[in-house]
Amino acid sequence: MPSRRGEAKSRRTNPSASARSSELVLGIDLGATKVVSALVAADGTAVYHSGRHLHANDGPGGVIATVLQAARRCLDFAEDRPLAIGVAVAAQVDPRTGTVIHAPNLGWRDVALGRRLADELGGAVHVVNDARAATFAEWKLGTGRGIDDLFYLALGTGIGGSAVFNGRLIEGGTHAAGEVGHLTIVSGGRKCHCPNWGCFEAYVGGWAIAQRAREAIGSEFGAGRALVERAGALEAVTAETVFRAYHAGDPLARRIVTETERFLTDATVGIVNAFNPSMLILGGGLVAGMPEFVPAVEGAVRARCQPPASGARVVSARFTEDAAMVGAAALARDRLRGSRE
Amino acid sequence: MPSRRGEAKSRRTNPSASARSSELVLGIDLGATKVVSALVAADGTAVYHSGRHLHANDGPGGVIATVLQAARRCLDFAEDRPLAIGVAVAAQVDPRTGTVIHAPNLGWRDVALGRRLADELGGAVHVVNDARAATFAEWKLGTGRGIDDLFYLALGTGIGGSAVFNGRLIEGGTHAAGEVGHLTIVSGGRKCHCPNWGCFEAYVGGWAIAQRAREAIGSEFGAGRALVERAGALEAVTAETVFRAYHAGDPLARRIVTETERFLTDATVGIVNAFNPSMLILGGGLVAGMPEFVPAVEGAVRARCQPPASGARVVSARFTEDAAMVGAAALARDRLRGSRE
């Protein structure tokens, strides 16, 4: 999911927007290191933000207490009760029950997050996987509006994704359809954080770009000194360090970026062939740091996908940091509408 | 799609079955070298088969004339008019109009197959991609009955596939969703027949297994003599030759099969992660020739997919040679029912 660089503090995001909170939904994005919540209007505008750093070591109880702090800050600001609450989590989620089945970065298994938030905050709480939430945001309010067959690819520290087919967000057998980060793109390749080898994420995920860069620095005498200086220490080199050094003309960073682009295009050509979307939307922190990736993917899709799948539009996401939170809010609003009809 | 070894002649397939043709649908499978048609009952049983060899060089007019011969032979056998006609084609098809958009092996572009068959034969004609038809057969009448999130993988000369999500066969933007044969599994790898490099099909498709075997024979002095003898000539070595030699204990065939299994499992682990089916159905001629592939894929999915996607059932298809034809008939029957309701 997108790297999130927002300050962990509260701010009124759109001073000009009216906080008619009777029309707002509370959106929450629960990541591995931070929770962000906001009051979100029907058009996806976030009216008031509240953020908190969190520590996975605190366990579900401690983390949920921090989530409640951020949420209550927004609720205090609202004039009336929001219509509903939507929560995005970097996890496998059962959206029907609101249970977090598995959140590797939080170390959670089977946590009844939706029920616990509903008990504390009242009202309808809708919990959803963050890539799926971001997909919904782009489909309903972003670049993908009106497109009924699209794929959203979240290029961040990890790689996530999700698809809309025939005007429906797909779930799959266990709500993980579209998790293309763990497609094998290098048979017998690098070990991934998951049980597989050679995954897309093991080459192009932010953590993997950083890992590949650190290996190159370590193995080549003198090379990459600029990268280490920029980061402060070898261990502190991240994908963002690499992208900044690339834009400053650093040769090692250029090599890492070129290789990354090759893996990215090889993966996305396969994804467009296999999922056959009308539109491929690229979002997440890596695209924010390297917007050059978007035309590179577009060129590869045109040249190397099978026609007519090769005609898919390739575009940048509208939402960056807020994608998952806005999408969770929009999904909660949508579900509310569904239950009223 | 599955390799088809059926004789290109007519036969009464189920002498005991009643040819109550008022309940039958005419199914047609139009491949690159052969057309097979049959009268198909509601349970997927084919009552009467008729086959014809065909030559893509004859062009759409000549090929369609051959299709009509095969179809009329079945219609002559029937007591009454079948309910409908379903046609599976190894091609990109627009199922709404019955137009074949692109059939690489037939050399067709934009051929109004459905309309031309309807003009000649009368009645409702439903044209569909063959992998999609086979998926429908397995979902409605085969191993996947009652499963609403499944992936069908057709391992034949080429590799095709298609998925059911939320109880619907997915189409994608241009009716090609599920074409996983052109997922990149070896970044920078072997050239595929498509415009991409390193595709799943370029390693595991029947043509690619044969190509890899012939390269190994050519490059290793003395090795593979048994394979060449078995096939009659180096150019005649096929995937089937390799599988038979493997089962006879040939060392080179063993190496090719072991490598193929590695590429197959690397690809299917990615497919199960990305599509997250409850069930993965393996069909096509390669599975018929190497049933050992099914437990190998199952073991890889359990060990290397992300939980809980790793719980997907991995099974063999019910239908082998007839899968696409039976599925096209079942789809035509289903559409008829839909239009009546």
Image: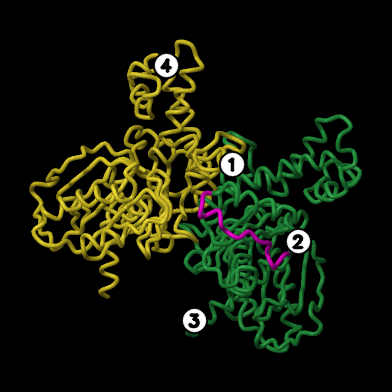
Chain colours: A yellow, B green
- Which three-letter amino acid code belongs to the residue tagged 4? Gly
**How far separated are the C-alphas under marks 4 and 3?**
66 Å
Q: Quadrant of the N terminus of chain B?
A: bottom right
Is A114 on the left-hand or right-hand side of A203? left
Disc 3 marks a residue whose amino acid type is Ser
The residue that disc 2 covers is: B4
Residue A230, picture quadrant = top left
Residues at discs 3 and 2 both on one chain: yes
Residue for badge 4: A224
- Tell us which disc is closer to us: 4 or 3: 4
Between label 1 and label 2, give the one nearer the viewer: 1
Q: How far across and how far down the image is residue B181, in percent?
A: 61, 50
- Indicate the secondary structure of the residue bearing disc 1: loop
Q: Is residue B18 above or below residue A110?
A: below
Amino acid at pointer 1: Ile
| Spatial separation of the CA atoms under disc 1 and disc 2 | 27 Å
B10 up-or-down from B94: above or below:
below
List the residue tagged with mark 1.
Answer: B185
Q: Which is closer to the viewer, label 2 or label 4?
A: 4
Q: Are marks 4 and 1 in contact (CB under 8 Å)?
A: no
Q: Mark 1 or mark 2, which has the lower sequence index? A: 2
What's the magenta region? B306-320
Q: Quadrant of residue A247?
A: top left
Question: What amino acid is found at the position of numbered circle 2 in the picture?
Answer: Arg
Mark toward the start of the polypeptide (3 vs 2) = 2
Q: Are marks 3 and 1 on the same chain?
A: yes
Q: Which residue is mark 3?
A: B339
CA distance separating discs 3 and 1: 42 Å
